[in-house]
Image (tube, rainbow, N blue to C red):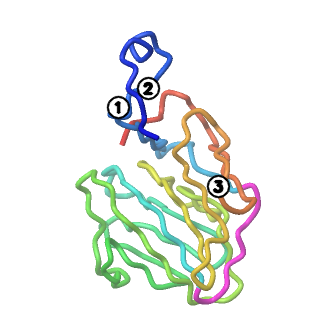
Amino acid sequence: MPILHAPILEQAGFVKSALEPVKSYAYRLDGVDQYFQLSEPINLLVNDEITFQTARDAGPAATKQWFASGTGLRINVQANNKIEEVGGDLYLDGVLVQNYITEFPVDGLEHNIKYDITSTDVSLVNLGASITGFELLSGYVRKLVVKRNGTVINEIPLTNKAQGATQLPTVGSVSAAIVGYNENDWEEV
């Protein structure tokens, strides 16, 4: 059965146009007091895979800006813009990161992170913050996916502006609360 087009109903606001673009959002962390706190740690096994998309703001030379943290697990950018990772093999836009050698782009664009876990007894606790006192991320993290044996075990889009300070999972039970939430920090990406 063909779909009918109803311009009068559309103009009245009863029908959305199929051509209208879908807006996508990300929550931009301020680098001062905002980060994502998971509702419970996601315990990881060797060969688990974490993926997310991120854009990092350029920060002062003395800061370490974190993308993910947890016991024995971390990804951060050193003051010299070199990436440090602990607990896995990190890929930036599909290229294996060389610890303390690969630089994180400061182009303000979104980049894809893939993190293959190689350590035992690690867990993901926060995004954008360290549990050991390093500087907070100024930028955003979105589309967090954790896979085990190729199957998604937890997924939090981190893109639902309507959900506000608590971002709910689409797979699994772990949600993410935005600590220091400000409704004006959502941006269209």
Rendered location of residue 65, percent (x, y):
44, 59
Q: CA distance from mark 1 to mark 3?
A: 24 Å
Closer to the eye: label 1 or 3: 1
Instruction: Read off the magenta span.
Output: 39-47
Going from N to C along the chain, the mark reached first, 2 or 3, is: 2
Rendered location of residue 35, percent (x, y):
57, 49
Closer to the eye: label 2 or 3: 2
Instruction: Name the residue beneath numbered marker 3.
Output: 170
Q: Is residue 44 magenta?
A: yes
What predominant SS class does the magenta segment belong to? strand
Residue at screen point 40% across, 37% down? 23
Q: Nearer the viewer, residue 127 or 51?
A: 51
Instruction: Name the residue beneath numbered marker 2.
Output: 16
Q: CA distance from mark 2 to mark 3?
A: 24 Å
Q: Pointers 2 and 1 in contact (CB under 8 A)?
A: yes
Residue 73, placed above or below residue 133: below
Left or right, 37 with reference to 102 = right
Amino acid type at image mark 1: Glu
Q: Nearer the viewer, residue 133 or 185?
A: 185
Rendered location of residue 38, percent (x, y):
69, 56
Residue at screen point 35% across, 36% down? 21
